[in-house]
Image: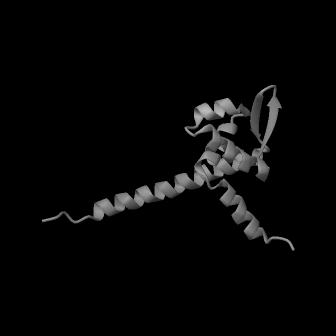
């Protein structure tokens, strides 16, 4: 029995739903990175990063290769970077809308007597 597309999408977004995973994906937009560089860029314990990288790797959204004793991670495709850029645009629009609403609320405030 196959999973409905909407359920598969929900599981995909749940997989993305961790700040460390999002940060890893953002960093990998600029190209492959060794684990040591990811660790220095993200304030997290090595075991925590390892756990989140494993989730991303199992989902197929990142790949890993070993170069000697160094493990290097990369995005599995350009669509991930596109998704992150789209998320940034959506958030920017949402936050801009909130800023406008906040400005309207402040203008409408009645001074206390």
Choose top left, top right, bottom left or bottom right for residue 111: bottom left
Which quarter of the figure is the C terminus placed in? bottom left
Furthest residue to the top?
68
Furthest residue to the left?
113
Residue sitting at x 16%, y 64%: 112
Q: Position of residue 106 (x, y in %)?
A: 30, 60
Which quarter of the figure is the N terminus placed in? bottom right
Residue nearest the observer in this picture, 40 or 4: 40
Choose top left, top right, bottom left or bottom right for residue 104: bottom left
Q: Position of residue 45 (x, y in %)?
A: 59, 39
- Is 72 placed above or below 50 here? above
- Is 70 placed above or below 23 here? above
- Is 70 placed above or below 108 here? above
Q: Position of residue 72 (x, y in %)?
A: 76, 33
Residue sitting at x 69%, y 56%: 15
Residue sitting at x 37%, y 59%: 102
Looking at the rendered structure, the number of numbered marks drawn on it comes to: 0
Residue sitting at x 69%, y 65%: 10
Q: Is residue 104 left or right of residue 58?
A: left
Choose top left, top right, bottom left or bottom right for residue 7: bottom right
Q: Position of residue 26 (x, y in %)?
A: 64, 42
Furthest residue to the bottom?
1
Q: How is the image coloured?
A: one colour
């Amino acid at each position: 029995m196959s999973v409905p597309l909407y359920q598969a999408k929900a599981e995909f977004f749940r997989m993305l739903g961790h700040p460390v995973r999002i940060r890893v994906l953002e960093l990998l937009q600029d190209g492959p990175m060794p684990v040591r560089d990811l660790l220095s860029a993200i304030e997290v314990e090595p075991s925590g990063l390892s756990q989140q990288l494993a989730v991303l790797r199992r989902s197929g959204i990142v790949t890993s290769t070993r170069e000697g004793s160094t493990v290097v991670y990369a995005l599995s495709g350009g669509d991930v970077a596109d998704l992150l850029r789209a998320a940034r645009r959506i958030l920017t629009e949402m936050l801009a809308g909130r800023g406008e609403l906040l400005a309207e609320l402040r203008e409408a405030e009645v001074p206390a007597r």
